[in-house]
Image (spheres, grey):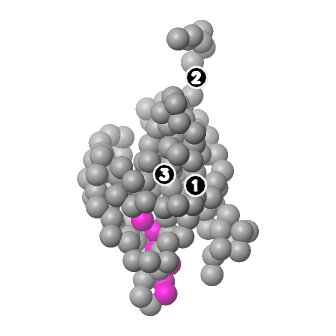
């Protein structure tokens, strides 16, 4: 395999998966990180892209591995690349989003310590730049007329 002389960024994916409470309040699915960095903090499901997979496949895989939730359609939100977003090094995340109308029954797997559905107005402090990703995901869904 060819290796570049100069360092290259890592690429990961994150998924902002929204739902609703019985009262109609919007929610987002989060995982509690089981490993550093930000061990114990809440975050969007996500992780590193494998060398042989496309971005949307990676997003669906990470969502399923960490929460046992599967979705058929993910909408790309955008790329997030602040050089300081990840203390492990240069990491660019491509974020995806979806809305699920049925109740979620997430179960923590892979490197997630726990999963939980949070109302959007009761979010805990989030790892990385995931608060920014959530806001961008909402704007993307509004733009595509999927947020109601």
At label 2, counting other C-alpha atoms closer than 10 Å, the crowd grade (few under 14, some 14-19, many 20 or more) is few
User: Which numbered disc, 3 or 1, marks the residue that appears first in the sequence?
Assistant: 3
Q: Residue at x 28, y 56 (%)?
A: 108
Q: Nearer the viewer, mark 2 or mark 1?
A: 1
SS under mark 2: loop
SS under mark 1: strand
Relative depth, front residue between 75 and 126: 75
Relative depth, front residue between 136 and 29: 29
Q: Which residue in the structure is indicated by mark 1?
A: 96
In this picture, is 101 found above or below 12? below
Coordinates of residue 15 in the picture (x, y in percent): 50, 55
In this picture, is 78 found above or below 106? above
User: Which numbered disc, 3 or 2, marks the residue that appears first in the sequence?
Assistant: 2
Q: Nearer the viewer, mark 3 or mark 2?
A: 3
Disc number for residue 60 = 3
| Residues in magenta, as a range | 24-30
Q: CA distance from mark 3 to mark 1?
A: 9 Å
Coordinates of residue 40 in the picture (x, y in percent): 29, 52
């Amino acid at each position: 395999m060819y290796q570049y002389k100069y360092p290259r960024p890592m690429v990961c994916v994150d998924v902002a998966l929204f739902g609703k409470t019985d009262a109609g309040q919007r929610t987002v699915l989060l995982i509690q990180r089981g490993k550093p960095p930000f061990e114990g903090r809440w975050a969007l499901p996500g992780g590193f892209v494998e060398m042989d997979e496309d971005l949307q496949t990676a997003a669906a895989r990470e969502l399923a591995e960490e929460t046992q939730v599967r979705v058929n359609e993910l909408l790309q939100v955008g790329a997030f690349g602040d050089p300081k977003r990840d203390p492990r090094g240069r990491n660019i995340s491509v974020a995806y989003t979806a809305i699920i109308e049925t109740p979620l029954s997430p179960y923590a797997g892979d490197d997630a310590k726990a999963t939980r559905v949070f109302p959007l107005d009761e979010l805990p402090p989030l790892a990385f730049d995931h608060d920014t990703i959530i806001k961008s995901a909402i704007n993307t869904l509004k733009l595509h007329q999927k947020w109601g």
